[in-house]
Image: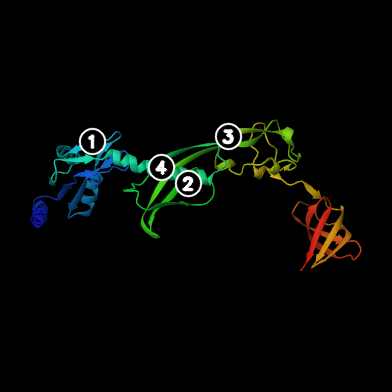
Amino acid sequence: MRKFILFSTIFLLFLGFLSANVLVQLKYNTVPDGNVLYLKDIASVYSNYESLKEKVENILISKGKLPDKIEKKTVYKKLINYGINNFNVTGPNQVLILKERAKTNNLYLKKKIENYVKEQFPYAITYKITYQKIPEIKNKDGVIKIVRYGKGFSNSFLLKIYKIKNGKILSQDFAQVFVKIWAKVPVAKSFIPRGKIINLSDIKWEIREINYSNHKFVKDPNELIGKKAKYSINPNNVITKNLLMNKVIVKRGDIVKIILNYKYIKVVSLGKAITGGELGKNVRVLNIKSKKILMGKVIGDDIVEVSVL
């Protein structure tokens, strides 16, 4: 019986090719990917002309709120409206649209993506995810792994979705999402002039949307207090790391303490700073006693550490 059905199907396809430039074989059902249906989603299209086949496959069948089924006569009308006259449509009289299954599969993947975003931005107070493209996950068998494409912070996320079972990749696809994130950030209470040392009275904490331009925001007050304003900061502007610099604690010409480290030996002497610098930066100093110029790191107010390998 199965052989007879297979033979009949092949025979019908053959007759279709003989009598039409395009043969459309309708499916019995389909699971939609989003709220748009093209002919290729509900049927297999055959043609000797590749460009014609591609045109027919991309005929829009339905958009927005999808129906529960697509009638064969609807497909006829669409083909005629798109200027396709020499065609043959075979298969069932209607294609069932399994919307509930698509909804369940999409909710499963959306939950995975939501958890991924939470892991990437643990400091977020709240967030909003807009799904621009989400692939169909046909079943929940296996493990879903999500990897982001691209580096740095951007509101647009291109995610690669892997489905893995027993250490083997069963499938891979892409999801495109747009993410908005809100977090508690420091904001200037009033105008902060360039060069001012920032203290608690200069700032207030507010929940703001974090985007590409201010993603280097300060999460901890210790990253902010005692720093110098690298540029002038206007009232109510978010204070980000790129607006700050460490306070200069060694100035050119200062008399500094030089701590010379050599293996287990530590020697302390006086020197004169040839260049100035902030905490953690390298400066050049003149050893007053030996008259040698040394390169060392600023580790405190007028203190320079020199390490000899």
Can you tell which quarter of the image residue 102 is in? top left
Q: Nearer the viewer, residue 273 or 26?
A: 26
Q: Amino acid at mark 4?
A: Lys
Q: Give the Cα distance between marks 1 and 4.
A: 23 Å
Q: Which label was assigned to residue 208?
A: 3
Q: From the viewer's perspective, is residue 135 above or below residue 192? A: below
Mark 1 secondary-structure assignment: loop
Q: Give the Cα distance between marks 3 and 4.
A: 25 Å
Q: Give the Cα distance between marks 1 and 2.
A: 33 Å
Badge nearest the viewer, 3 or 1:
1
Of pointers 1 and 4, the one earlier in the residue sequence: 1
Q: From the viewer's perspective, is residue 170 above or below residue 309? A: above
Q: Give the Cα distance between marks 2 and 4.
A: 10 Å
Q: Which label was assigned to residue 68?
A: 1
Task: Tell me the quadrant of the picture where the N terminus can be found.
Answer: bottom left
Q: Which residue is mark 2?
A: 116
Mark 3 secondary-structure assignment: strand
Q: Position of residue 295 (x, y in %)?
A: 79, 62
Q: In this rendering, would 246 be left or right of 121?
A: right
Would you call the spot at circle 2 few (<14 residues within 10 Å), some (14-19), or many (20 or more)? some
Q: Which label was assigned to residue 110?
A: 4
Instruction: Please say if the residues under marks 2 and 3 sit with CB atoms less than 8 Å apart.
Output: no
Can you tell which quarter of the image residue 244 is in? top right
Mark 2 secondary-structure assignment: helix
Of pointers 1 and 2, the one earlier in the residue sequence: 1
Q: Amino acid at mark 1?
A: Asp
Q: Amino acid at mark 3?
A: Arg
Q: Nearer the viewer, residue 256 or 264?
A: 264
| Residue most extreme to the right | 289
